[in-house]
Amino acid sequence: MQNHPVYSDNDPQNELSTLNLGPTHPATHGVFQNVLQLDGERIVSGVSTIGYIHRAFEKIAEHRPFYQITPLTDRLNYCSSPINNMGWHMTVEKLLGIETPKRVDYLRVIVMELARISDHIVCNGVLGVDTGAFTGFLYMMEHREAIYEIYEEVCGSRLTTNIGRIGGFERNFNTIAFAKLRKFLVDFPKTLKEFESLFNRNRIFVDRTKGVAAVTAQDALNYSWSGPLLRASGVDYDVRAMNPYSSYEDFDFEVPVGENGDVYSRFLVRNEEMWQSLRIIEQALVKLEKEPTDIFHADVPEFYLPPKEEVYNNMEALIYHFKIVMGEVPTPATEVYHSVEGANGELGFYLVNDGGRSPYRLHFRRPSFINYQMYAPMSRGMLLSDAIINMSSLNVIAGELDA
Amino acid sequence: MDKITNEELLQNLNAKFEGVLTVVGEPFGLLTLETTREHIISVLSYLKHDATLQFIYLTDITAVHYPEQEKQIGVIYHLHSLVNNVRVRIKVFLTIDDIHIPTATTVWEGANWMERETYDYFGVLFDGHPDLRRILNVDDMTAFPMRKEFPLEDPNRVDKKDYFFGR
Amino acid sequence: MSDIQIVGAPAGVEGAGFFATSLDKAVGLARANSLWPLPFATSCCGIEFMATMASHYDLSRFGAERLSFSPRQADLLMVMGTIAKKMGPVLRQVYLQMAEPRWVMAVGACASSGGIFDTYSVLQGIDEIIPVDVYVPGCPPRPEAIIDGFMNIQSLVKTESVRRRNEPQYQELLSSYGIQ
């Protein structure tokens, strides 16, 4: 599939019509534009335009200290912001050589899997809405509220969480958070089962999505796809399994793989990933019982702010506090690339450091951006309604697309 | 999946490409090589198609601007071999005045938007790219914003009082 | 010249008159409780809006059941999320297409003032290009805050005059933005 722009001279008899899809989409998808040339209902060619929400994250990151970049990473994939936060913290910890205790790793795993579930709730729910089934979305959003309540107990915020610090978390998970988590693990599987029963063998949904936008593994790899899209095409590449981080190697989970990469496989892969995430969270809760309950961060006073009581009473804590905030702590002047499995694919952070307190260059390898470039070539020859379903199944989050 | 070590990878590459690649280092276990723009496409192509190495996955293409160096712009390629579970980073340095480099879209289609983003941010001209135009910034922008001399904030703002910001 | 006698208004009942004032109130009530919003959702605030429209924080209790994605059919333009300079002309076109009476709500810090993104590519507040009625701060604002903003819009709608578009201050405001 060649990725060429639309030719204005391929229509000498002026038979094709031009349709402008975007940038103001019906709410959920985000701001990006597709100018399509249509022959009746069939798409002849298309050009994608993005950048309507370009917020220059990479430029801002050069002017902020490491701990102030976390709120920026929140706003990349804002449906699953904890994954972005954790990925950034792990990148900085890799650079600084900080090793986090096991309890921190397990808590991070819980938070990241909750974020993955919440992103897949939105994606699959919205795919249902686009095919005309509003019920599934409405029932699943209730559980998104339950996940928000768990985040609120830990970090205070619902959506753009800024959760965690370099070296761990800002506060220990209290008993209310664990109680809410346990309640979520009881309630959500019932709704997920109901959701699957509504869609998986639903004649209308299957007809709408099966065989639509099938992508071979060869093409997917050529376009550097990752995440559920690549796995639906048959390639079992999951960063959690291949380059495990945050103690994922201690967990027993499967990586769901689809058959032919069509929209139906992507839907099924995301559903199965939600089941696997629930499995991982249950295992994490079991493992947490064996760990001491008062550790919630690594012992790195040079990068983790000491508690305020100690700052006012203890000389070393005061000095560390001063050095961290004023940026007097030397950092290694090297470069690091770390990637995590985001909800959409491999989310990578390429950090070039010069020894100061801000990065010299920070580049985000954004899965939505790299996945979306195939949309225009892929929609050639498709019916318009199939192209819409295809776009929702790609799960393009505008914040991650434009950064 | 057996893993190839960095030494084996380096040996394999040096056997095929004599003196073209220099080893910059191995920060955090990721072999980092440097090469020139004349050889980059053959190196990438060999890495992708070789039966033992199989670096079929292009993770990312980006660039870094070092204003103090003579060759100011470095184009960085990250590759990943899924079969052997090994990654490699390749750098190519270019001067500001002669900022051309051949495109990697002949090897991977996925390099298309990655190179457009690099062009948009740094002005790196990829020769042979099918559609090299700006992707994230406004189309009529003339400067390249990620270069170090470009300011972060909009200089035409009239409502920010310098007094309050300590300037 | 006809010979129909017209009685002058009794003393003390100037201007609109008793009947017209009640009509204002009735029209305001009807408008306020059936606002059709246009969710112009660009980024994270759009996801909080989705949560507001869902069953937990139901915005349709306030009359906003029917979301309109066409500006011609919408009353309230809710701008939720960062507006980049590339998106500015699009937002302005959407606003121009809306028919009077129309209200604008800037949801979130980015729409109100540019938010945390003080960069070359972000519009520092949508009030640089369109007039805004209610600003909802927050990053992102909680659904309760969005509902509070919506209720503020409702009180504006109830208390403003029926033909706000004809008032001189409104005309002056629009012309300062270059909108006729």
Image: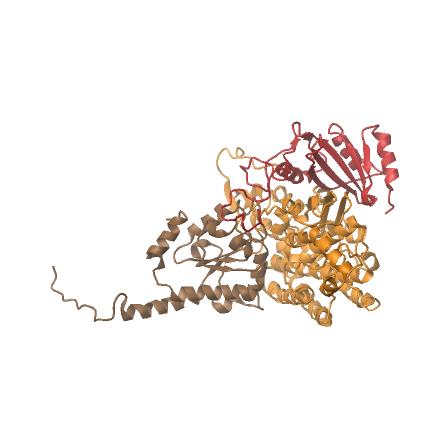
Residue closer to the observer: A301 or B106? A301
* Residue A2 visible: no
The image quadrant of residue B24 is top right
Q: Position of residue A293 (x, y in %)?
A: 80, 68
Look at the picture and state if A252 lies above or below B158: below
* Residue B53 visible: yes
Q: Which colour scheme is used?
A: by chain
Residue at the image point whose x is 80% and y is 45% from the top? B82
Residue closer to the observer: A29 or C124? C124
Is C132 left, or right, of A112 in this rendering?
left
- Chain the render paints brown: C
Residue closer to the observer: A304 or C1? A304
Residue at the image point whose x is 51% and y is 40% from the top? A16
Q: Position of residue C81 (x, y in %)?
A: 55, 54
Total count of labels: 0
Q: Where is residue A57 in the image (x, y as percent from the top left)?
A: 63, 47
Q: Where is residue C46 in the image (x, y as percent from the top left)?
A: 57, 57
Is A328 left, or right, of A376 in this rendering?
right
- Chain the render paints orange: A
Look at the picture and state if C77 lies above or below B155: below
- Chain the render paints red: B
